[in-house]
Image: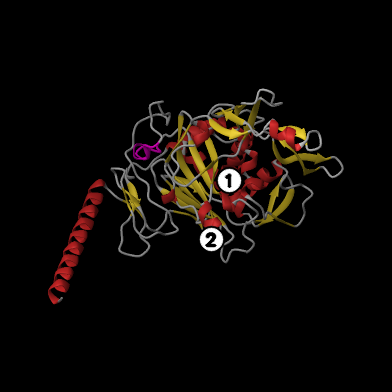
Amino acid sequence: MIDKCATKRARTKVDTNQPDYMAKSLSDSEDANTTFSEDGSTSSANESDAGSSLNGSHRSARSCTVSSSSSSSSSTSSSSLSNRNAKYIFLVIDSSSTADNSSKTSPTEASCQQETLVNGFVMRWPKFGVSNSVYNDQCYSLTNTCAVDAGLFSLYFLYRTYIDFARELEDSSESSSYSTLLKTFNLVEKKGWDVARVYWLLKFNVLKRSDHGRKDLFGSLDDRVFSFLKNHQRYSSKIICSRSDCPQKERNTSAVELTINVGDTFIEIFEKESVGVCITTMKKIHEISEAEAQKYKYKRGNIPVINCETNKTEYVEGWLCDSINIQESVKFDNGNPPVLIINIEPLRRRIEEGYLPNPVRLRDLKRILRVGQAQYALGAVIHHKNQHFTATMIDRLHNLYHYDDQIGLRAPAWFQPKKPSEYRHRREVMRQREMALDQLVQQSSYTAYSIV
């Protein structure tokens, strides 16, 4: 048995010497990136893959619930909210990385160190692969585990660093997938990550007891981890068609997938109703003539049907409603979930121009995301590069940690504490450089004018 009180005490233990303001150190190298100052402004420099720094005033608010008077465009005020004691957190994934794209190569050298000190307590992390791990008297070996590693460890990090998320897991019903996630984390602390991963995969039939030899876990984040948890973020709304004789004049819709664009401060479908076009089937293509269809303002389109013999979806032509419909703002079916799993929509313009979408970076994302009447703090970003999943996590004190199952968990080398006085000094140095550059330009222009 795991002492839950002990795990809670471990999660709330914080290094009192930890500074309140954390930011990327400024350097003259080409790898300098955007930094956030204590007043919410940003300064832009050259980009790097590492991401951005995070800082802000630590408020004593117990949760991140937002009042109805908050503005959707006030990103500056939102970014000043603290992650500390945040009740709700969200995890984002580059949507271009969720297909079958786990690492197909073995790590060059796996680190022997499986523990890292995070805010005064030891954090265990999973290594790439599982070799001859025994669970319930059976031996298992796994390869290409980076998808399950990045997904589960990101959630484990949030569980250990955000007390409200931990309480939600501990209070979940026995039949809930949150309960399975909690048991997985308890196994991490009791028996290690190898046994915990095997338990998780067996529980959701990704791994079977009949599997012998080395199991290849090549697959997506959804297939290995997130699809089993997304039902907690199911949301629904009502759609009303403007056509009086529409067979589905009023209908309910439900989904679990959430998507945002880079730079979004809120999810629009939770904010207001939307207008769309009804695609309900009115008639089969042979039931009325084209003149009648035009009279009723139907639209020719494809209708999905299930082939009973092949059990596959096929499409046949038919007449669609094509009237305006109104979709009400959506709401979560079971209240606000403690954590949201959100996909990042790739930049459509780059795809249309034939370029690959840019990877998601922390500097591209807002730290606070409004979802309905609640605010969620950014807790983790899962990246995909060179056919390998990694993750960047943010704790309640805004410290950044990068995780790679082939290397380990560590704070980025460029991530160093900064105080408000250091930000002011840096801005003064930059101002003096700009003044010197302006003077140089003026002198050069004057000299050129004299020569002419």
Label 2 SS: loop
Q: Quadrant of the C terminus?
A: bottom left
Picture quadrant of residue 61: top left
Q: Position of residue 190 (x, y in %)?
A: 59, 43
Q: Which residue is mark 2?
A: 355
> How far is the residue under mark 1 from the one under mark 2?
31 Å
Residue 13 x/y as whole percent:
41, 39
Taking 251 as reference, is 373 left or right? left
Residue toward you, 279 or 193: 279
Residue 285 appears anywhere in the view: yes
Residue drawn where x is 19% and y is 66% of the image = 441
Q: How is the protein colored in the picture?
A: secondary structure
Element assignment for label 1: helix
Number of on-image labels: 2
Name the foreground residue: 335 vs 400: 335
- Can residue 6 be seen at all in this image of the molecule? no
153 on left or right of 75 = right
Q: Which residues are magenta?
A: 73-84
In the image, residue 337 sits, relative to residue 353, either above or below, namely above
Disc 1: which residue: 152
Residue placed most toward the observer, 229 or 43: 43
